[in-house]
Image (cartoon, rainbow, N blue to C red):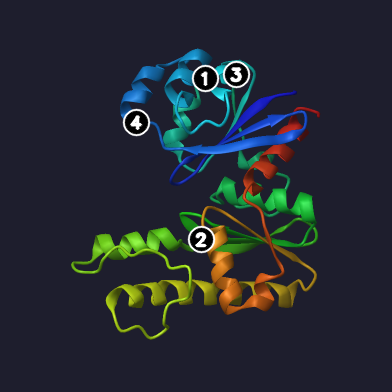
């Protein structure tokens, strides 16, 4: 299988990856489909229709809009944490849904997010087990496996953006703030910096605590961080706890690395 597309349906966006015989060539993100787009796709969307509706836009790098129809006639591999979005693709003839049962980790539980499992598998296959994965996405998650690729468990909490949005949306007077490049005053004297302080310092301290606890149990383990907020989280960790930050591996495409491992295994490549 020389060329194929992979789709990770995340909590906030659709994440796309283009694979060739060289491996992962390109990634990009799109928003969820609008209701009008879903209606246009119909029960059996053709590659040409998919390309014109979904990919004919400025976000596509290069001239991929002219070649994506050909890729879509081959195979589209999908992993998803949003069942309603997954259902849109089940009638598509070339879609292959990756399930939790296909991931060779031990000790998985039925409600584990497949994004977490794929990221963990990709990290373990690339840097070895044991490994701890931190995903700074809509949700901030921690997921670890031991030397036998057995899931040790993890944790989930609201990510940076979700915490900011929740305070603004669920309170009467708190504003929606922006994240600063430098650490805010810990004991702030205005509302915006107080929100920045509360969110940033508690999240960074929590990440530090999870990493240190993991390293006590698995001193030789790598820690890999991924997700849309990975860079700002590593930046804050570097400012606050540089000795920990310098040991982190930053990998934006960790889920696709896991998907690539699963796809190559099940296609015999």
Compute the Cα span from label 3 to label 4: 24 Å
Q: Which residue is mark 1?
A: 92
Q: Disc 4 vs disc 2: Cβ atoms closer than 8 Å?
A: no
Q: Which residue is mark 2?
A: 140
Compute the Cα span from label 1 to label 4: 18 Å
The answer to which image quadrant residue 83 occupies is top left
Mark 3 vs mark 2: which is more N-terminal?
A: 3
Extreme residue toward the left, this view: 172
Q: Nearer the viewer, residue 13 or 101?
A: 13
Q: Nearer the viewer, residue 183 or 39?
A: 183
Q: Secondary structure at mark 2?
A: strand
Query: Is residue 126 placed above or below 30 in the rendered structure?
Result: below
Residue 198 appears at what percent x and percent y?
A: 40, 76
Q: Which residue is mark 4?
A: 34
State which mark lies toward you, 3 or 1. Answer: 3
Mark 2 vs mark 1: which is more N-terminal?
A: 1
Q: Secondary structure at mark 3?
A: helix
Residue at 76% from the left image edge and 62% from the top image edge: 130
How many neighbours does mark 1 have within 10 angstroms: few (below 14), some (14-19), or many (20 or more)? some
Mark 3 vs mark 4: which is more N-terminal?
A: 4
Residue 66 appears at what percent x and percent y?
A: 56, 17
């Amino acid at each position: 299988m020389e060329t194929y597309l992979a789709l990770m349906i995340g909590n906030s966006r659709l994440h796309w990856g283009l694979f060739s015989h060289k491996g992962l060539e390109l990634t990009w993100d799109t928003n969820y489909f609008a209701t009008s787009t879903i209606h246009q796709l119909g029960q059996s969307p053709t590659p040409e229709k998919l390309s014109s509706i979904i990919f004919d836009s400025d976000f596509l790098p290069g001239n991929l809009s002219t070649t994506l129809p050909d890729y879509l006639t081959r195979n589209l591999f999908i992993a998803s944490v949003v069942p309603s979005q997954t259902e849109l693709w089940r009638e598509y003839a070339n879609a292959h849904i990756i399930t939790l049962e296909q991931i060779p980790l031990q000790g998985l539980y039925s409600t584990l997010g497949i994004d977490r499992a794929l990221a963990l598998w990709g990290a373990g296959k690339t840097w070895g087990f044991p490994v701890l994965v931190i995903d700074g996405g809509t949700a901030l998650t921690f997921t670890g496996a031991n030397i036998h690729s057995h899931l040790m468990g993890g944790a989930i909490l609201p990510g940076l953006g979700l915490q900011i949005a929740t305070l603004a949306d669920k309170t009467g007077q708190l504003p929606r703030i922006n994240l600063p490049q430098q650490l805010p005053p810990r004991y702030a004297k205005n509302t915006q910096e107080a929100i920045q302080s509360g969110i940033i310092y508690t999240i960074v301290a929590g990440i530090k605590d999870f990493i240190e606890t993991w390293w006590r149990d698995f001193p030789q383990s790598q820690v890999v961080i991924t997700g849309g907020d990975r860079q700002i989280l590593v930046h804050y960790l570097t400012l606050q706890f540089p000795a920990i930050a310098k040991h982190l591996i930053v990998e934006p495409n960790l889920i696709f690395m896991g998907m690539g491992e699963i796809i190559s295994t099940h296609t015999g490549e």
